[in-house]
Image (cartoon, coloured by chain):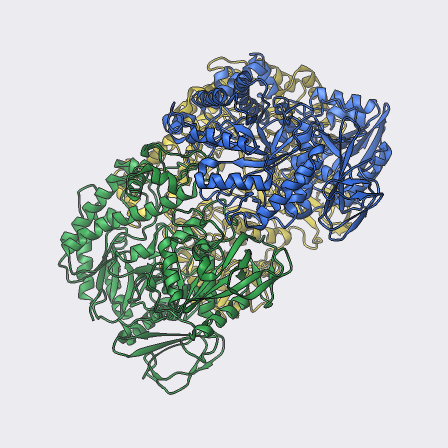
Chain colours: A green, B blue, C yellow
Amino acid sequence: MTGPFAGAGLWFGGDYNPEQWGPDTWAEDDKLMRLAGVTAATVGVFSWSSLEPEEGTYTFGWLDQTLDRLHAGGVRVVLATPTASPPPWFSFAHPDALPVTAHGTRLWHGSRDTYCAAAPAYRQAALRITEQLASRYADHPALAMWHVHNEYGSLCYCDHAAAGFRRWLRSRYDDRLDALNTAWNTAFWSQGYTSWDQIVPPRATQYLPNPSQTLDFSRFWSDELMAAYLEQRDLLCQGTPGVPITTNFMLPNDYQNLDLWRWGSEVDVVAVDHYLNATGRPGRADLAFAADQIRSFNRGRPWLLMEQAPSAVHLYDQGIAPAKEPGQMRSDSLGYVARGSDSVMFFQWRTGRGGAELHHSAMVPHAGPDTRVFREVTELGADVRRLAEVAGSTVRARVAVLSDVNSWWAMESRGMPSSRMRYLPALREVHAALWAAGVTTDFAHPEADLTRYGVVFAPSLYLLSDAGAASLERYVAGGGHLVVGCFSGVADETHAIRLGGYPGGLLNLLGLRVEEFHPLTEDRVVRLTTGATGTLWSEDLQTRGAEVLAAYVGGPLDGRPAVTRNRHGAGFGWYLSTRLDRAGLAGLVEQVLAAAGVGPELPGAPTDVEAIRRHADDGRSWLFLFNHGDLTHLVPASGIDLLSGHQVDGELALPSAAVAVLREH
Amino acid sequence: MTGPFAGAGLWFGGDYNPEQWGPDTWAEDDKLMRLAGVTAATVGVFSWSSLEPEEGTYTFGWLDQTLDRLHAGGVRVVLATPTASPPPWFSFAHPDALPVTAHGTRLWHGSRDTYCAAAPAYRQAALRITEQLASRYADHPALAMWHVHNEYGSLCYCDHAAAGFRRWLRSRYDDRLDALNTAWNTAFWSQGYTSWDQIVPPRATQYLPNPSQTLDFSRFWSDELMAAYLEQRDLLCQGTPGVPITTNFMLPNDYQNLDLWRWGSEVDVVAVDHYLNATGRPGRADLAFAADQIRSFNRGRPWLLMEQAPSAVHLYDQGIAPAKEPGQMRSDSLGYVARGSDSVMFFQWRTGRGGAELHHSAMVPHAGPDTRVFREVTELGADVRRLAEVAGSTVRARVAVLSDVNSWWAMESRGMPSSRMRYLPALREVHAALWAAGVTTDFAHPEADLTRYGVVFAPSLYLLSDAGAASLERYVAGGGHLVVGCFSGVADETHAIRLGGYPGGLLNLLGLRVEEFHPLTEDRVVRLTTGATGTLWSEDLQTRGAEVLAAYVGGPLDGRPAVTRNRHGAGFGWYLSTRLDRAGLAGLVEQVLAAAGVGPELPGAPTDVEAIRRHADDGRSWLFLFNHGDLTHLVPASGIDLLSGHQVDGELALPSAAVAVLREH
Amino acid sequence: MTGPFAGAGLWFGGDYNPEQWGPDTWAEDDKLMRLAGVTAATVGVFSWSSLEPEEGTYTFGWLDQTLDRLHAGGVRVVLATPTASPPPWFSFAHPDALPVTAHGTRLWHGSRDTYCAAAPAYRQAALRITEQLASRYADHPALAMWHVHNEYGSLCYCDHAAAGFRRWLRSRYDDRLDALNTAWNTAFWSQGYTSWDQIVPPRATQYLPNPSQTLDFSRFWSDELMAAYLEQRDLLCQGTPGVPITTNFMLPNDYQNLDLWRWGSEVDVVAVDHYLNATGRPGRADLAFAADQIRSFNRGRPWLLMEQAPSAVHLYDQGIAPAKEPGQMRSDSLGYVARGSDSVMFFQWRTGRGGAELHHSAMVPHAGPDTRVFREVTELGADVRRLAEVAGSTVRARVAVLSDVNSWWAMESRGMPSSRMRYLPALREVHAALWAAGVTTDFAHPEADLTRYGVVFAPSLYLLSDAGAASLERYVAGGGHLVVGCFSGVADETHAIRLGGYPGGLLNLLGLRVEEFHPLTEDRVVRLTTGATGTLWSEDLQTRGAEVLAAYVGGPLDGRPAVTRNRHGAGFGWYLSTRLDRAGLAGLVEQVLAAAGVGPELPGAPTDVEAIRRHADDGRSWLFLFNHGDLTHLVPASGIDLLSGHQVDGELALPSAAVAVLREH
């Protein structure tokens, strides 16, 4: 096996910042890492001021020692460029490179990421330190991977950003202002531009901003950050051609500033920092949702879990960081592996004693190694070694959920029919229904080749390009089952509405026409003939060939179609015009899967048991089993449990909270 | 008949923006407008960048064609000046004319209304484009009315605004700083001004601002916007002396930046953009509340409904835009006519395909003419033609509710006894009680001649000028029934408290003295001897001659008067010291109306049926009937139903959701 | 007796601003003050623009007259420097002295406190007007006390503040940047400073700020304000060596910008402005909480209640100002006296008729003297005279609650384990339990000598200096009972975590080690073996010698210790690892008090009756009794009731809402 992970089993370790500690701690680190079975460490993230304390003055000594020490201990190094946090001397010398919010507030040094990624001074300084690292460590034997920057995503609306935006627009619109005026529909509200100089980012304005302008700014910014990434990547690639390069993605709950489908093709391996957004079963659904996305962004290949929390995770909507219960770190970590990660890595090795994240959990807590957390880390390290053989294998799905950040961005516009109708929850809801049904699921881009999938779901795919519409048409005509959710196919890629009835891009495929949206207030529910209920949204819909599977009962849409199916070519286009309750959605999912002949990963598995397989090219497979319930369950499975070493024949008794990984026959 | 509407029946149509479409669409527009019976179109709103794409370069071609086309189709044109949205070239050339918030945030181009109305460059540019329009279209036969700007109201706190504020203050206070210092009570908190230059708008400050300063700034800004309006109006008037001139008012729920009593006397006809703030019956009460205000601002004469939504309306407090149910557009539209509108007009003709309001409903929806909405538009057009004869007739009310934006502005000050005690809800509550009682109601200014009214309500008339107090005194002494709500007459027009007991301006008339306010927390209710309850507010009140109609029961005010009546001259001053529950308020309204001998518009009408009359000078009258209930109701009425053509003799069976308009005998 | 109050009984009066009124009102003021028994007036607060209307022009005439008038009426004067509100001319001349928020918004004149306390121009102007006052009124016989400024506390983040911050840091860190880098842990997130110039205040930044930087900025700002205070104090002291000097503290609910332990040693007497934060019993607990703090900041000596509200008090969290019920002003006023105040003073004498606080209640309301409020003021004046003999006596407590604003500041950092775990509620909760138990309680600084106390409570003493830890160690070793609340002793004084298990500073004393925090979401409760429940917080704790008093039942901490006690030297260290429900906390308090042999102020007093004693050095004592219940209670007490003149022998029947003050035998 080749590739980023270099056939070395699963990587185990975390972010390591020795510059925050001294030699005594380093000695303990060496000992404890060996004890825990650490095999990989991410080094250098945010270390800029420790590496270049003043412009052009470099202090690499501690980093030299760190790499030597780690290498001596058999720990491979993911070496980060430190560019996510310029040192104070930089901000002081270049105040114009500090970021500015849409409201014109200049943000100051004192945290991290206090730079505008479009500022020339920043970009130059970032390349200089990257070049230094590349040349110094190119041949270091510990160097296993480059990690560029950290968690790209911070926005800026300053004049550098404005200049970059204009450059990007000139390129996108072939230097034709009339094309931009058309795409942005600037005849509305007197916004016709007659010079590129007149264009600004979507800064604070009087009332509703132009939604095409905000959409293009989102695209621009993703590309501008990518340009900053690519500059570093290319420089590193030149210096160390054989060393794989990555940067770590995030999957925040409230926003997304990167087009991760595009970013995914620019890294050698997709790495992710994932922090659960909930405890208990919802947290576990979130884990699957994240892992399935990341694997898909990485085109199905093994990926890198770069950061997760060993224990307490901040739930930002609740302002609280609950500690993980005993065993949860193990179960979650193996959960990522089950869905294709070739690593179990954490932020961070050792809890900081000061600075902004001083209460962030770590592998070695404030209380030291004589703690539940460190003991569990050590046990987990052993488990990870036992699973070495799964490295390089992949997950295979026959169902996909379409996702496109352009729909997300467009749906965040102000003045939409309902501000309660948001993109991410729509995606989560469908994925969660499939997860609950035990079905292994990929994510896919609307324009991708979908032929490998038996069923494809398109929840609220509001913005759909012409190419996307054609792709879906091909998929269904070729025999696929496409399940389109409400508020899909409404806008084209400029965020202009497709006229003639919604969903403009899919009318033919679905055999229907939506005349008008009927969004629902918080206290409203619609009822269907199937007994299911819908919330948030409903639509006034007329079939034009489609079969009605369920109709509305009562209310202004009484008797109108709610769920439909249309035979189209060799396949079927399904349409769902509301957001079903959990049971209703589960029923629809079951119906579609049955129609398409697609089943769960492990037929007969109890509801509480999550089952997922990894497959090697040579035909071997591994079945991962997790019991999320409170009782022991009997699971129909066979093979050798790599964790316990036990042979399983036909049935495995899996206790509450237990994990098994069976090498199948 | 003469006047703005020129004896042409009721106008039917909407905002029309052909510059956002092309010739193919124009051809379809011509056809569909004819089909729908459109007779009026508002053209040119926000068209500045399409008319003057660069400074001094004009592109009137499309507008010439539009007016010619409309004229050929028999559609009269309300021609707007496009000054509510300066083009990008303007903002780029004059950054100092961009608006600035109270917090110092400069707002940028990218929406609409991104100008400071006090900026000289803006005012000059606005006059230049207005002059161009006036001279080009003065003699166009389609021109039926000028529409200046659009929805005046945007605030600014920049240095231009500051300079204007100082000019306005010098004029208001006769260039006497000591008069300002007295009016603003600047001895409090060390605010004595010794130079006009020291005065700024009420920008962000450390703690509570001076409430007299904020009040004067509100007055100034209404006047500054009016000055901008008058400049355009006078210029248009000069160029086309015979053409009526208007601008469209708004009635937002959260704020009011214009003194509409003053503005009402500066337009040839009051025009309004009205968007319902609720669905169902509350929405209908809002319609009556708005229409009665607008008619009153227009001194009772027929007015112009310039914008309403054909279907989905954004409920901003809920972040959602629910579609209207079948039939509602018709019922609502005729509801405005019933209350004096001589038009049924919409924003807008055709739903935009892009730009900020791309989901705003329109007469021709995204889905095209083969839709419920467009079919209802067409039917409504026919109904409107059937009602042509009511044009020019007026509504007659014997009850008035006093309203004064100065009370609103003053009550929005911080540091009031209760931030839950707001002006608009107090007005709505009383109007809704009268609406539910079937009583036709005007609004009136406190200083107006009120003799025509049998009963006058004054809900929370917190700020009362000396002239206003004298006016109310005259009204009651002359035989009127004045019902004063709690928290009235507290402050004079500088927002200084009238000392010696509340309500300082009305002590004699009411025969009582309020010693202290007892505002109620959200969980508190007060009980009255009548069985009614009060919320939000109560008062420690002593009668000085007034009769006690109800007293408080329990709590700190146990046994104290709550509702009183005082004989004063030939009339009565009633006082209500709390905010009654709905039934309690209905009971009090009934009692007052009975005492004054004032009845509902249609005695004997069922509760679900809204009845309202328009009267012609020649003695003819039309009875509008709306059934808002779920059942058919028998209504005691006679005449010919202009909508159905049926003769009604003594009793009309009005089905649920139906409308009838009887020409009475 | 000597000291600030000069043996003159209890002071009675309030803020008096004659400059807002004219001679007619002054004459009435003289009459009414005599009627009410006013003996003290605070004059000159916010009078700057009336005293120096233009730079260098002084208009002291009205103030001369005021002092003469008051003196003639036997009213002593607390003369304020007016520096809390610079006049408009100052702000206009020195825009750089206007304050700037952390987000960069410059605040404008128009309220009060619109200055940056670090701006040189402001400091100079403040000293000039202070010098004028000092020299003019040094020998005025009415002058009883100087009152510097008003309610210090407003923040600023401007460049003057930044320069001051750097100066303060250089001093704190002995000009050693490496010391600062260590203290701030700047190796985290690349914040290593290489020049003092690179340091800025914690202005708006991208993400979490450095918690050590924000902590030091809070300390700096408290000291910067103190420097401004000391400049004025020293100047006044020089001019009038015998006159006591104070400034009024506030105890807001949401923040605290001053280190009041440090400030308390720089005033001759601690003065406080206290506004109840609730009505009913919670308001009364707040009164005790405030009074006990203020007395403690004043090192136990009689203190000055400078401001309270005669009636309506703004409850800012509810946006409402409910009026006080009859009798409450009296009961509350005597409540402050009971806890050591030698004054009953109000803001303000006369309700303003205009300006920002025009609805703030006062001794003479808008409605004038013929009002309930003024009648109660007059009666209270007589009561205060009857209590003259208690002046100079003090309160004695055997229980203390530790408080340290450094813990508060540190706990307000972002990124803490739970944003729901806040400092002030933790303090309130423990104090309220002691108050409900009838135990007289002091507050104390952790580093103070605690030997006089039988029991000391340390709720959430998150930040604990080395000196503090040593002090607590000494206290327990010497025989004290220290009750440490959860989330204590976690950080050292730089806000670095003490490693090796929490609470790092107290491990030995408590005989335990906390491994990990388990903060609780809002819907979670933990149960204890005692039947008590905990919310907000729990901890994974191991005893190392301590006795387990209660353990967790169920959940992830099932069976782990929750409440412990450790014998240490001659005393005991108690530990409470969650936040108990009210009954549970009451039970623990009872247990600790019993163990320490400390009882309530009045054994046998009914629960509804609040009892508190003042003691004179000569052995006399006065027992204050307040019945907060709805029924008459029998209280075991003896003495002469100074208010009624009645003799009480063994038992007093105290009606609902009544107050008695017994001079005991």
User: Is A311 left, or right, of B417 in this rendering?
Assistant: left
Determine the residue positioned at 37% across, 55% down.
Answer: C498
Residue A145: name its quadrant.
Answer: bottom left
Can I make out residue C481 in this image? no
Residue B177 % position (x, y): 55, 14
Residue A177: name its quadrant.
Answer: top left
User: Is B225 left, or right, of B548 in this rendering?
Assistant: left
Image quarter hosting the C terminus of chain C? top right
Residue C317 % position (x, y): 59, 43
Comparing B98 with A555, the one in front is A555
Residue A544 % position (x, y): 51, 60
Comparing A608 with B375, the one in front is B375
Can I make out residue A307 in this image? yes
Comparing A549 with C430, the one in front is A549
Residue B85 % position (x, y): 46, 31
Does C564 appear above or below A421?
below
Determine the residue positioned at 18% across, 57% down.
Answer: A65
Comparing A496 with B406, the one in front is A496
Does B104 appear above or below A339?
above
Does B660 appear above or below A369?
above
Q: Which residue lies furthest to the bottom in this view?
A: A649
